[in-house]
Image (cartoon, rainbow, N blue to C red):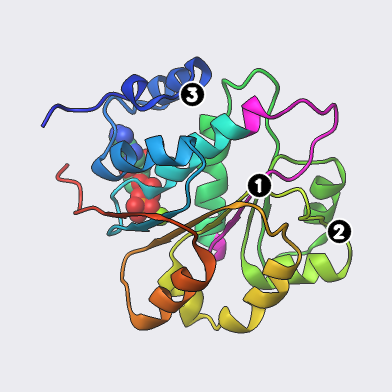
Amino acid sequence: MTVATFASLGLSPPLLQACAEVGYTTPTAIQAEAIPPLLRGQDLLGLAPTGSGKTAAFALPLLQRVIAGRQHAYRRVRALVLVPTRELAQQVGQTFRRLGTSCPRPLKVAVLHGGVSPNPQMMALRGGCDVVVATPGRLLDLLDRNAVRLDTVEALVLDEADRLLDLGFSAERERVFAALPADRQNLLFSATFPPEVQALADGLLRDAVRIEAAAEAR
Ligand code: ADP
Ligand code: MG
């Protein structure tokens, strides 16, 4: 099998530059498999262990979509990433920011999680943002306060879906999903695939590409 390069996956120059700047020389297995279908707008089920590079596997194609579709003068939420924990929200938000630095217009990423005052998060949202990374509880809280609108979301990511479900996400997801447009790209990533995750995937994904990747040997 030939080794893929980021350029061969269809990523645009600003994102190739971002990969080089953060020191990603070769795509991981899940990145090589996931990026082309994600750039085509397909739904995706990604089953891969921790450390396999899942964050960039979804951040790079979603950033490309955000850049390409920014015909509006104002910012609106184009991509929503749901994660189970505050730490993960910060990590994923950081990856979007780092990979988004080469974008033609500065990218705004709002990171929403509990354990801190909602006020700075509400201020960040008021300024407009392109990407929201959130834990479900705080996102619902901010939806209830009308601090965030999700009716412009084009892509939804459930990251670490198995852990999201462990948190009791099933009770919250209907309310979050109801705030999203029905026509959108859906991505679900999980390290394990118990029946509950399968049921979540079955309800969420349409004609999804399914990718299973082994741990990266690094
Ligand atoms: P996962 O979500 O699958 O657990 P992460 O997305 O957190 O994995 O990535 C794990 C680590 O690998 C991170 O430190 C990330 O910066 C690094 N990484 C991701 N993709 C690449 C790549 N193509 N080349 C080198 N390092 C990478
Ligand atoms: Mg991850």
Whether residue 138 appears in this view of the structure is no
Q: Residues within 10 Å of mark 1 (few under 14, many from 20)?
A: many
Q: CA distance from mark 2 to mark 1?
A: 19 Å
Image vertical order of residue 150 relative to residue 203, above or below: above
Q: Is residue 156 part of the magenta span, yes or no? A: no
Which sits in the foreground, 169 or 119? 169
What kind of secondary structure does the magenta stretch mostly adopt?
Answer: loop
The answer to which image quadrant residue 25 occupies is top left
Which sits in the foreground, 39 or 66? 39
Q: Position of residue 210 (x, y in %)?
A: 33, 56
Disc 2 target residue = 147
The local secondary structure at tag 3 comes to helix
Disc 1 target residue = 154
Q: Residues within 10 Å of mark 3 (few under 14, many from 20)?
A: many
Residue at left offset 73%, top offset 57%: 181
Q: CA distance from mark 2 to mark 3?
A: 30 Å
Residue at left offset 49%, top offset 59%: 206
